[in-house]
Amino acid sequence: MTGRRTPVRRKGKRRPARRGGADGPAVALAALVAVSLAAAAVRWLVAHWWLVAVAVVVAGGAAAVTAHHRVRAARQRRLHAAQLRLALTGPGGIDGMAPDAFEYAVRDLLQRDGCHARKVGRANDQSVDVLAEDPTGRRWAVQCKHKQDPVGGRPVGVGVLYALAGTYRRSHGAHVAVVVTNGRFSRESLKWGAEHGILLVDRPALARWAAGGRPLWEVLPRVPGPRDGHHR
């Protein structure tokens, strides 16, 4: 006699219990609290409106004072730049500057002349230390050569002019190329610069420019205009 087999029940996957039911009251309570706090804040602001008005007035006054100080500081910087005078020798003179400080001094003098000037000299600077645009729209590319021994040291060689001539138009879109030094230029540099339109500011010209109030283009011979050179 064959016995009956008891059927085996397969265990099914239990479905996870839903949790949404417990979160509903908490969310509703949080929303109610938020609304209550907002309403209380509005009632407080309405009751103390004068504090809000005072805060607005104080903030506006502080902003006006800050703007006034900024305008005054900018005006003082312009006046200082317009009165800038530098000597070659003596305390704070150009001869005692480091090469980097000399580049900044040339930039400041160009700003004194009314130019928008910035120092760009660094590694791979394409032979230009200062770029400037004068009030007539001419763009200047300036190479600065500071000499620790400006009188007895070596003059600025023509290689400096070669490098500047090859980059000031193509790489910087400048109209005017200038080499400024507190020393002197070699004979070859003087000849080549005159032939190729590279303006050279030697020690005497630098002294007149830095210590006087005349712009650089009034100190130098004829300076080319925007139509005389290539401009990007």
Image (cartoon, rainbow, N blue to C red):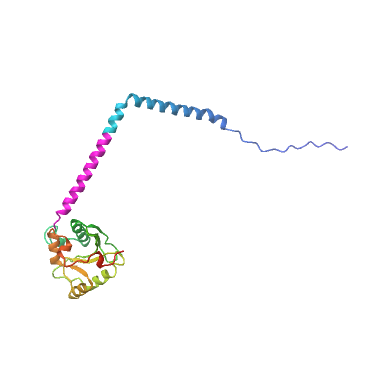
Query: Would you place residue 16 above or below residue 147 in this image?
Result: above
Q: Is residue 80 magenta?
A: yes
Quadrant in which the N terminus is drawn: top right
Quadrant in which the C terminus is drawn: bottom left
> In the image, is 77 to the left or to the right of 32?
left
Residue 90 locus on image (x, y percent): 11, 59
> In the image, is 60 to the left or to the right of 82?
right
Residue 19 locus on image (x, y percent): 57, 32
User: Residue placed at 12% from the left, 66% from the top?
Assistant: 204
Residue 131 locus on image (x, y percent): 25, 61
Q: Nearer the viewer, residue 75 or 152?
A: 75
Q: Nearer the viewer, residue 5 or 44?
A: 44
User: Residue placed at 20% from the left, 68% from the top?
Assistant: 199
Q: Nearer the viewer, residue 27 or 119?
A: 119
Give the total of numbered labels.
0
Query: Would you place residue 28 above or below residue 125 in this image?
Result: above
Q: What main secondary structure does the magenta stretch of the protein show?
A: helix
Q: Name the quadrant containing residue 175.
A: bottom left
User: Residue placed at 41% from the left, 26% from the top?
Assistant: 39
Q: Name the quadrant containing residue 219.
A: bottom left
Query: Would you place residue 189 above or below residue 31 in this image?
Result: below
User: Residue placed at 27% from the left, 30% from the top?
Assistant: 54
Outermost residue to the left: 90
Query: Would you place residue 122 above or below residue 188 in this image?
Result: above
Segment colored magenta: 58-85
Residue 89 locus on image (x, y percent): 12, 61
Q: Is residue 89 magenta?
A: no
Outermost residue to the front: 227
